[in-house]
Image (spheres, rainbow, N blue to C red):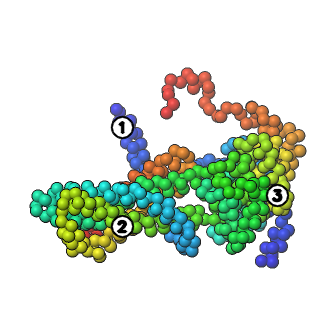
Amino acid sequence: MTKSTLLIAVTRMLRGLGSRMIDRIWRLGAGARLFFLTIFYSGESFRRFHLILREIYFTGVMSLLIIIVSAFFVGMVLALQGYNTLQKYGSSEAIGVLVALSLVRELGPVVTALLFAGRAGTAITAEIGLMKTTEQLSAMEIMAVSPIARVVAPRFWAGVISMPILAALFSMVGILGGYLVAVPLIGVDDGAFWSQMQANVDFRVDIVDGLIKSLVFGVACTMIALFEGFDAPPTAEGVSRATTRTVVISSLTVLGLDFILTSFMLVV
Amino acid sequence: MYITINAQAMNPNIVEIDNLSFGYKGRLLHKGINMMFPRGKVVAIMGGSGSGKTTLLRLIGGQIRPSHGEVRVDGDVVHKQDRDGIFKLRRKMGMLFQHGALFTDLSVFDNVAFPMRELTDLPESMIRDLVLMKLNAVGLRGASKYMPVELSGGMARRVALARAVALDPNIIMYDEPFAGLDPISMGVICDLIRSLNDALGATSIIVSHDVKETFLIADYVYFVANGEVAAEGTPHDLMQSTLPFVHQFVHGEKDGPVPFHYPAANYQSELMNSKTND
């Protein structure tokens, strides 16, 4: 390889890298702009709350099955694994605390957000992407109806409201699953299971922090899904790619945010 | 206000395109286009695929901004309006999209009621009567409970037309209203465009490349090619035109000023070239 060929290859690589960076920054800016516009138009959505309620049904209620079934199995596995470890140290009665704290602090908000991104997030992206492809958003614009006020804002608030409720349900069902494995199946004392949980789970530190996390995840996941749909190229391939991006970006964002939020919550 | 009303009343054109240029990604789509759309008339914009006809509708609707020149609707320069101004102008417009653009999660009734519910404070009982009147005008009152997915292409286009005229707009824009329709549906849409325009006293702007149907109902036609107005006149004048482009377009000739082949390198030298396409 001659010197000039190498130089051309390096230049091309740097140019490609720069172009990708500019594209990412542009998308970040466009996403932030959509977020602020959504907040700006939110008043209109709250005045017509039935629009938000309708979206809560599609994003929240329709996600209930996957959330409840997953929570049940996660709780049961937690109890099995937890008991296996705790019994080595003679603290098998602490199984209730272990299940409850794991679910309320971490698994409830995080797994709910991941499932939400896969179930409701993809549905939001695909729906808005297809509305764009079939010119429904343009039709609204030309009718002097803002698509952000009519389509984006109600879905955003539906996601933000649904997520903490789904996370709380996830934790509750998970604890029930853990109880069924720990008490009737393994034979841990019923009283010890509940009393230890009651004594060691703090409402402010554990439950409220978990709910704050799920609220933040709700904002992030819903906004990513909405932006990807709104920004999708109006083609079948464009919508398909946007849907995939929603899951990937939401999942990574949730895991990253979880680390940041946990760090802050442990310090404060 | 008095001056504005007088100026509007005196201006015979509801839409004026003045020395308009528009381009994107380094490609100039329109180069200094001038058009007039008189009140109460049906005016067609014709031209080949990719000639920027639909873009002109988007410029009139203020969905995109011109690079140079201006579009005036009722005397107001579209791209100089703020959000409220542009929404005010759009309330004077209705648009029929190429594939209808019906809201797939709403029934036929709710699609037509949509602009009334969103933009007016009319009571639901009045909205019901108005929607049924609009649907009756397009012959689909009996289909009010259907969902868009249950409609044929022609029916969907008629519902979209009922929605476009729901608020009795001054300007009705049609983007390829005849594309992909069977001859009966085409005839129905053709008839509806003319009759609704006359009944509402509106101005219709039709973007199309269907010569026969468009010439049947248009009062005036603009031909767009290479980013410019290549010809204009009444359908009768254009049918008699000897201009090579108009002749080729009107008679559907394969080759002419619009070449059959897209500009490319020399055929023989490209075939002989051993390099593969990247």
Name the one closer to the observer, B152 or B96: B152
**Disc nearest the viewer among 2 and 3:** 2
Which amino acid, mark 3? Asn
Q: Secondary structure at mark 3?
A: helix
x then y, percent, for residue B232: 82, 48
The answer to whether residue A96 is visible is: yes
* Residue that mark 1 sits on: A6
Name the one closer to the observer, B208 or B98: B98
**Disc nearest the viewer among 1 and 3:** 3
Res A168 label: 2
x then y, percent, for residue B251: 81, 36
Q: Is residue A243 above or below residue B11?
A: above
Same chain for the residues at labels 2 and 3, yes or no?
no
Same chain for the residues at labels 1 and 3, yes or no?
no
In the picture, measured across the screen, residue A207 lies left or right of residue A151, that is left
In the picture, measured across the screen, residue B2 lies left or right of residue A60, that is right
x then y, percent, for residue A156: 49, 65
Q: Secondary structure at mark 2?
A: helix
Quarter of the figure with the C terminus of chain A: bottom left
- Mark 1–mark 3 distance (CA, rounded to whole Å): 66 Å
* Residue that mark 3 sits on: B197
- Mark 2–mark 1 distance (CA, rounded to whole Å): 57 Å
Which amino acid, mark 2? Ala
x then y, percent, for residue A206: 28, 71
